[in-house]
Amino acid sequence: MKALLLSEYGRLETVEVPMPRPGPDEVLIRVAACGICGSDVHGYDGSSGRRIPPIIMGHEAAGTIVAAGAGASGAREGQPVTFDSTIYCGECDYCRKGEVNLCDRRQVLGVSTPEYRREGAFAQYVAVPNRVVHKLPASTPFAEAAMIEPLAVAVHAVALSNLRKGDAALVIGAGMIGLLVLQALKQAGCPQVFVSDIDGTRLQMAKDLGASAIINAKESDAVAEVKALTSGAGVDVALEAVGSTPTVKTAIESVRKGGTVTLIGNIAPTVEIPLQAVVSRQIRLQGSAASSGEYPRCIEMLASGAVNVKPLISVVAPLEEGPVWFERLHERQPNLMKVILTPGEDGK
Ligand SMILES: [Zn+2]
Ligand SMILES: [Zn+2]
């Protein structure tokens, strides 16, 4: 089969590799669409250290089941599916509690570290455990289904945010995850969702997707703007989808006393926080990792039109064009949001 291989840092090539063979509890999926994640771009140049070559990356995917192991009950050939990017064991204490994102034996598809290597979905076929697979309605286009993985990340973060109906929220960062968080907050019953970023184009997209107000943090004081929008009180919750000292600080200073800050972004491994503001104002800091159990709801949100991912997809391109698009994403070409690669022929 054809696969896009990271053979060394900064070097991707389309190569011929053996087809994966599904184990007893696995299914073999013909990949129709797989999105390039920011984490793939940070793996591509070696900066994250989580894509040690050689590795086939790709964890935001959808396709069709073409074969199933003997123990993969309920798997049917020809069934359109998507799958969790977290390969969890299903047996440890966390998995039993439904916290599969915290699984003791957690692996991530298309990731290689010194501990493990798990080939991903930038390939014509991928084998994954049947337990991580979710059926798709026939009406969902594969390219949009590839967005269910990042949508689940957003919905999970919102679910952890201690929200009550009517709460006002701030989203920091209008990238892919931030724009999905915005939509998930509206769905969760937040009448007022403000979005801050330093990129005017992305802020306009946030406005188009339903933001009540947009704040350009390059041109104005984001905290002061939030206070002005909330009669001086601050928002009930802030979701931080960047992960740097200034943005985490903005999140903490923008919430009301007793409010919640949910931390999703983590481009910096360490940030400085205004400790006394957190303690004396009793702010809750909540980390959010991947997702656990949100896939079915996200599939439904996409199918019903409750969430619109179309404006977030910039390009749908064949697998062979992967090296070019990775390079453009790496160079931060303006206005380039999600790039979806299509290794298969199912141009649905
Ligand atoms: Zn991702
Ligand atoms: Zn587990």
Image (tube, rainbow, N blue to C red):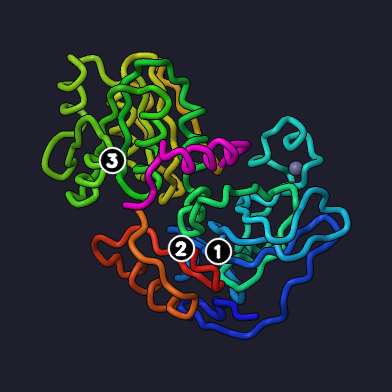
Secondary structure, mark 1, is loop
Mark 1: amino acid: Gly
Does residue 280 appear in the picture of this structure? Answer: no
The residue to which callout 2 is attached is: 36
> Which residues make up the magenta segment?
291-311
Q: Residue 115's x, y, as percent?
A: 70, 60
Give yes or no for contact between labels 1 and 2 (Cβ–Cβ under 8 Å). Answer: yes
Cβ of mark 1 under 8 Å from ligand 1: the answer is no
Residue lying at the far front of the rendered structure: 139
First in sequence: mark 3 vs mark 2: 2
Residue 216: where, in percent of width, then height? 17, 41
| In the displayed structure image, the side of residue 74 where residue 233 appears, left or right | left
Q: Nearer the viewer, residue 267 or 239?
A: 239
Judge left or right: residue 215 versus residue 52.
Answer: left
Q: What residue lies at 60% left-to-right and 53% top-to-bottom? A: 82
Q: Residue 124 is drawn in which quadrant?
A: bottom right
Q: Which quadrant: the N terminus?
A: bottom right
The Cα–Cα distance between marks 3 and 2, rounded to whole angstroms, is 22 Å
The foreground one among 54 and 183 is 183
Q: Residue at the spot x=50%, y=51% of the render? A: 140
Q: Residues within 10 Å of mark 2 (few under 14, many from 20)?
A: many
Q: Which residue is mark 1?
A: 58
Q: Which residue is mark 3?
A: 209
Q: Quadrant of residue 265?
A: top left
The residues tagged by marks 1 and 3 sit, at their Cα atoms, a distance apart of 27 Å
For label 3, the crowd category at 10 Å Cα-Cα, with few meaning under 14, some 14 to 19 and many 20 or more, is some
For residue 281, above or below residue 132 = above
Label 1 to label 2, Cα distance in Å? Answer: 7 Å
SS at mark 2? loop
